Image (cartoon, coloured by chain):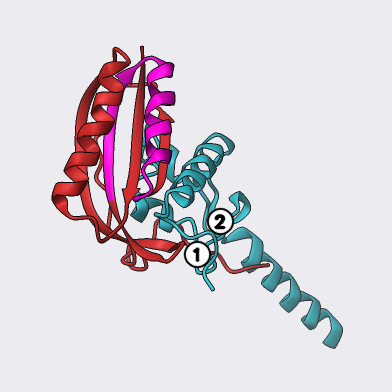
Amino acid sequence: MDSRDRDKAKKKQFRKKFLFRKKKFCKFCEEKIPYIDYKDVRLLQGFTPERGKIFPRRISGTCAKHQRELMQAIKRARNIALLPFTAD
Amino acid sequence: MVNYESIFIAEPNASDDEVAAFTKGFEEAVTGGSGTVLKVEKWGKRRLAYRIGRHEDGNYTLLYLNCPPAAVKELERRYRMNDRIIKYLTVRVDENIPDTKPTEAGTASEDRPVETLEAE
């Protein structure tokens, strides 16, 4: 009895974790941004959190194509000192 | 003929006149190589994201070009010759030129486009 209750609770937790997660989507596909510009610092900054690293696709949900373009843009921006390579 | 975007950073203590003179010289490098300068955008003084040498700030200028690759070579040679240019970047652009100004850094926290999902 006791253990069954615990199982139920566990299952509920499991469901909560996996069924009701917010769906990720690619920002660039959604907003139909045709070209990721390295000069658009504000846009790129959203993908380089505190340390200045590039936000992984796994978390941001960006699609492969756009992640590639994003990476290129961020690297260009870094080269010309619009974005930091590292923050402290 | 290929479209390029070329951006250079002059020393922060270079006056507007000096930067204008540099820009003129660079434009000549392009026109001399049978290319055309489509547009010049002056961004002015901006904070650098990291120190370059002893500089914390830089004077940015952006050139939109349509020229043969040889002209870019000459342009970059001139960048390197000028010791008041601290950094430059030339990028090839394929499609019709996107018109963007640099957005100011440091205000991204509110309208951050990506939502950080909690780590598993």
Residue type highlighted by circle 1:
Pro
Say which element carries label 1: loop
> Are labels 1 and 2 assigned to the same chain?
yes
Image label count: 2
Q: Which stretch appears magenta?
A: B60-84
Q: Which residue is mark 2?
A: A55
Q: Which chain is red?
A: B
Q: Residue at x 39, y 54 (%)?
A: A82
Residue at mark 1: chain: A
Asked if residue B97 shows in the view, the reply is: no
Q: Quadrant of residue B91?
A: top left
Give the structural element (helix, strand or loop) at label 2.
loop
Q: Colour of chain A?
A: cyan
**In the displayed structure image, the side of residue A24 where residue B78 appears, left or right:** left
Q: Residue pushed farthest bottom? A: A2
Residue underneath mark 1: A49
